[in-house]
Amino acid sequence: MDPRQIEPSAAKARDSTETDHLGTASPPREPGARADAQPARPPAPATFDRRAVGTRVRQARNAAGLSLRTTAQRIGVSPATLSAIENGKTAPSVARLICLAEVLDVWASHLLDDEYQPTPPPRRRTPDATPHRSRGADESHSPAPLSDPTEHWREFPPLDIDPVLSAAIDSFVDTGYHGATMRSIAQRAGMSVPGVYHHYRDKQDLLVRALDLTMDELHRRVRAARQHAPNARRRLIRTVEALALFHTHRRELAFIGASEMRSLEPADRTRITMSRNEIQYLLDADIDAALAEANRPGAHARDAGRAIATMCTALPQWFRLDGPSTPEQIATTYADFALGLLGLVPEPTEA
């Protein structure tokens, strides 16, 4: 998440510019920016009955013996979002449908097929469909369910990801979005180019999926961190710690979020910008509450909020796991920095 733009007030009315409060004002795509040779993006699947798709998703989930909450955690959405999909109130994206099929162990086509049966045949796994971990535990890229999010938001276990998305993330970090091609991604994934297109429509789908994974996990961890805090001060500390931990443990995803927002197509750029802004508004609210609790002036609270967010979102630019400080040490130090910036002197018992 690129931290360069500072918006003066979270309450300020939006104008025609897509302002990313935790990042930059997302500019229009430069002419010729997507000059890498890509096949024309096929249209989205023909309109389908989202209520029927939701019913099939629920049937497949029940057949797999998975609860709504467990399934939602595994695909990186809230239970409410999955419930909306199952009830036909919202239609899943292509990437989300593929992810659901992976979790429910069925072919994605079964979730769209009018002749789908309540007990789906198991999806025949191939080497291309095997969950893949492209790097070591500390380098994993996809969000995983937190067994108890309110207690384990500090933990970052190894996270499985499909080989195509893993290769795409590595490519975007190494060469940038515009330097990567579906062919180079396929080579990294050890797959054929048609095999990659079987899973994702194009490179843009891969970028959207990577940023959705980023935001889903970030929201989940920040909200879990804020729960059960005994007071406003501790809630602020936990929020800053959650941001710092995410941007160190998940630094590759965070790096892509900082550098590739401008590469998104307008609709997704607007949607993800709004999601990022929600995180900033949570931080702003925690700052306001902590200052009020301590009877401290809040004249520059918004500027402080942007500065605190900036130092966290900048972590992927320099932090390394083999460096002198651990993510946990960075998180504690950054929470102290935040308190100091707000004139709230850190207490010896705070860790």
Image (spheres, helix red, strand yellow):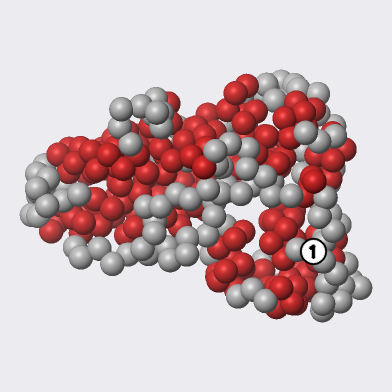
Q: Is residue 175 above or below residue 41?
A: above
Instruction: Kindly tell me whether residue 272 is visible in this rendering.
Output: no
Q: Is residue 328 above or below residue 290?
A: above
94 displayed left or right of 224: right
Give the residue at x 36% y 63%: 151
How many numbered marks are there?
A: 1
Query: Which amino acid, mark 1?
Result: Val
Badge 1 element = loop
Q: How far across and how far down the image is residue 183, in percent?
A: 80, 27
Return the residue found at the far right: 115
How many residues crowd around disc 1 within 10 Å: few (fewer than 14), some, or many (20 or more)?
Answer: many
Q: How far across and how far down the image is residue 115, in percent?
A: 91, 73
25 displayed left or right of 64: left
117 displayed left or right of 238: right
Q: How far across and how far down the image is residue 164, in percent?
A: 72, 40
Give the residue at x 60% y 23%: 174
Where residue 322 sits, quadrant-wise, is top left
Q: Is residue 293 above or below residue 49?
A: above
Q: Is residue 250 above or below residue 242?
A: above
Front residue (pair 330, 276) = 330
Where residue 334 sits, quadrant-wise, is top left
Give the residue at x 70% y 78%: 62
Front residue (pair 20, 166) = 166
Give the residue at x 56% y 49%: 159
Front residue (pair 96, 10) = 96
Q: How far across and how far down the image is residue 9, in percent?
A: 32, 44
Q: Which residue is mark 1?
A: 106
Front residue (pair 97, 191) = 191
Instruction: Kindly tell me whether residue 142 is visible in this rendering.
Output: yes
